[in-house]
Image: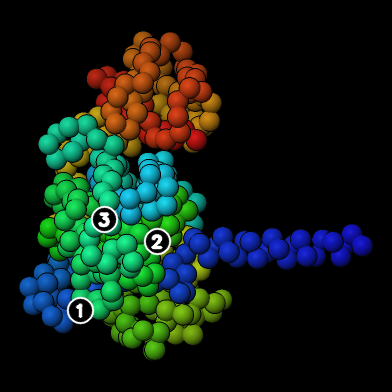
Amino acid sequence: MKNQMKKPANFILLIISLLLFQIHGMGQSAECATDYIHNNLMQTDSDYRKQINLLESQVEANVQSHKNRITRSKIYNIPVVVHVIHLGELIATGTNISDLQIQQAIAGLNTRFRNVNGLGVDIELEFCLASKDPNGNSTNGINRVNGSSVLNYSANGIKPTGNTCNGAVETAIKDLSRWPVSDYYNIWVVSEICNGGFVGYASYPVGGLYDGLVIVSTSMTSNSGTLPHEVGHGFFLYHTFNGDGGNVSCPIDTNCLINGDRLCDTPPHKQGDCGTTNPCTSAGVWDNSRYNYMAYCPIVNRFTKGQKDRIAATAIAGPRASLLTSIGCGALGINEISSHKIFSIFPNPAQSAINLKADITLLGSAYVVYDNTGKIILKGTITSEITNIELGNLSGGIYLFSVGENLKQTYRVIKE
Ligand SMILES: [Zn+2]
């Protein structure tokens, strides 16, 4: 009797687990539109084609020469602005997702780029919601605009340029709210893309007024596989199955630096192949492709060393380079977070209190806690090696802790 009770329960748990994993990955049915847009532009826009080819040769040269990589003594922070193009709902309702959901989505993006699960490679790149707007004023990095007045938006969402679906014209939606692409990575959160046809897409790094990433509101979450996938495209990563002709044939892999996804540590495969063996090749580490954020497989959990090098080579070669020196997050001095932290904070995420563990050289120094708009919430002096700070009265979200000489050492903490 006991066993009979147990089996259905286990089965239900298995189904729930599978459903959760399905949410994590891109999923088989809900696709990314990046390739559709890119392929269309490569065929119809000669300037775009020239820019991509130029960037590709620069990136390839950077990767091959092993020169000019991002110096790994520091973590680069990319300032992000999120534009929520909602349908007129109240904040935290429907497509007008809450600040907290957005902050948690960015935190989730960072845990994936920093390889917190330990299954892949640390990209050593982080994303921060802008704390300064283009005019130098404080901001939480989130803009909300009602997009329902744009033709077709309420019924079908946005239509990526070059697509023939019935959505609203992409530039009309992006013109509702956009910040300079030289200083901010723009993310537009939308109700739908082509009436549910896609979950996201991103521009390859060729610059321009409308550069950035588009994602549906339901995928802008802390456990989203779509957000790291699209940001990967934004930093010039291709799908691991690039060149499969739409799940038709194994990608050519004569030279892994210029075929397929142009990476040598992600074995070529077909989009739909995610099983225990790779029908295209037995060479290489198959898990690097089938569990990759740039695959369409149901479980995704890693970037590779090759992808890290390509992202680094792209960040210094293309129009994204200016983001590395942007002061969009710089009002609080967190543009470059030192990798030589002389204090640590635990637990993080935190609930009611945190402990600040400081190097003995910091005794007598001030600490300051800011909220995500830059407002000072708490301050005090470090008097012992471990300082307990109560957070009970603070609402959930991201806080910044600064300590040390001139408060230069800054750390992000999530209050749940
Ligand atoms: Zn994609």
**Residue 205 in the image, given as x and y percentages of width and height:** 19, 62
Kind of residue at badge 2: Thr
Answer yes or no: disc 3 within 8 Å of ligand 1: no
Q: Residue at x 32, y 71 (%)?
A: 194
**Residue 139 in the image, given as x and y percentages of width and height:** 24, 35
What secondary structure is found at the residue carrying circle 3? loop
Taking depth in this image into account, of 94 and 126 the one nearest to the observer is 94
Q: Which quarter of the picture shows residue 5?
A: bottom right
Q: Is residue 109 visible?
A: no
From the viewer's perspective, tell me whether residue 207 is left or right of residue 118: left
Answer yes or no: disc 1 within 8 Å of ligand 1: no
Q: CA distance from mark 2 to mark 3?
A: 22 Å
From the viewer's perspective, tell me whether residue 372 is left or right of residue 151: right
Q: CA distance from mark 1 to mark 3?
A: 26 Å
Q: Tag on residue 40?
A: 1
Residue to which mark 3 is pinned: 147
Q: Residue at x 23, y 65 (%)?
A: 151
What secondary structure is found at the residue carrying circle 2? helix
Residue to which mark 2 is pinned: 226
**Residue 407 in the image, given as x and y percentages of width and height:** 28, 22
Is residue 108 shown above or below 269? above
Q: Residue at x 48, y 80 (%)?
A: 273
